Amino acid sequence: MNLSALPPVEIGDVAGTIRLHRRELELVRRVVATHGTHASRRVLLVEFVTADGVRGWGECGAPDESGYTGETADAAATFLAGIAPGVIAGRRSLTATRVRALASAIDPDATSRHPMAVAALETAVLDAQLRATNTAFESLLGSTPKRAALAGATLGNQGTDDSATAAIDAVVADALEAVAHGYPRLKVKIGPALHTTDIVRELRTTLGDSVVLLGDANGAYPPDDVAHVASLGELGLDFIEQPFPAHDTSSHQALVATGTIRVALDEGVNSAVDALDALVNHECTDITLKPARFGYLACVDVLNRAAEHGAGAWIGGMFDTGVARWANVRLAAHPAVTLASDIGSSARYWATDLTEPVVADAGLVTVPGLRNPGLSGVPLST
């Protein structure tokens, strides 16, 4: 990624150079995962203001509860409120590439305990750098970006609160609606207690073979379930994301060796480089990159190398608002992102988004283009 030609942004002595904002949003439909139910988000936004008044934005992907990776939005907000003054203190300029080192100098555990908070701050500074120099993020990719990115839809699994029949019918109805809007890939939350086998069987029977099905297990299956998870591939599940707990290397390798289903990791990787290492180590067949955890700079670096291994890649989401969703669309313009990403229309998730809504048409989201400076979506009000 060519950042050498991107000048630092001037900080100056402006009070409130880094500002934190909280916004409450209700999901259009609840989504049940093995680590909890998602019905709303209390979003944390990071705003970085330069001396010239240019504003850069980052969105912290940390959820309200700690079940995903232990990091919560409230903890991230507390951490950033404490560390942000030290990151900018005594400095007249700043670059995104310096954010992680500066945060770690203040708190050595910053990137391990608060990866999504650090990524949000890094993104806000990068967005400001790009806007201050009238530069589009895509122009830094080092290769010709795609004009449109493949979008995927996440289905609203209703979980065990309803009967099996009601849960299956609800997922299938949601899937049919998504397919009618042209989504080529559907993600459904799966796990031992989420009617998974019946849902996969019914989805494949109803949808036929033209739609890619991805099951997101969030590490819910125990090691002795390798054969069962492999059988989901035989039923028609094309991909599974994080089937076994983080760092269960042997189970993931055993599943990959069956050759019945394509495997990607999520909670099991702590950095973008870890994702590439897992691929080389045969723990997965494809790469999902979550910029909310790794940051956009690291994701681009890995994408530049992923194609060498013949792996598919997609950009993973965190029930993002348009601030991060638009940034993910622009990252998904990278030529190495060959699979549909978690960048569906805003309307599938929020009644009203914080930014101009992302709109998927026939399964594609048009990338903003090289003429538009910046990276993140801009909130309509603050």
Image (cartoon, rainbow, N blue to C red):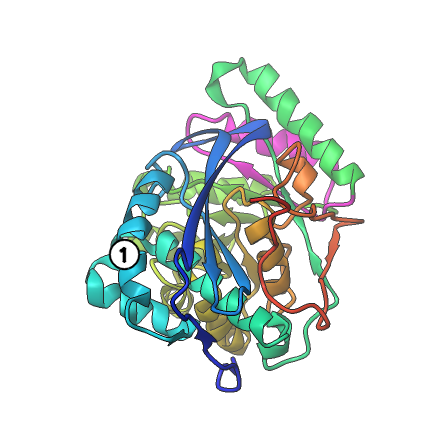
- Looking at the image, which residue is at 33% across and 66% down? 88
Amino acid tagged 1: Ile
- Where residue 353 sits in the image (x, y, percent)? 63, 40
Residue beneath label 1, please?
Answer: 83
Q: Nearer the viewer, residue 130 or 178?
A: 130
Q: Can residue 240 be seen in this view?
A: yes
- Looking at the image, which residue is at 71% across and 73% down? 370
190 relative to 112 in the view: left or right: right
Is the residue 289 above or below the residue 248 in the image?
Answer: below
Is the residue 43 above or below the residue 135 in the image?
Answer: above
Q: Nearer the viewer, residue 199 or 236?
A: 199
**Residue segment shown in magenta:** 182-209
- Looking at the image, which residue is at 32% across and 52% down? 80
- Where residue 119 sits in the image (x, y, percent)? 40, 59
347 relative to 269 in the view: left or right: right
Q: Nearer the viewer, residue 310 or 122?
A: 122
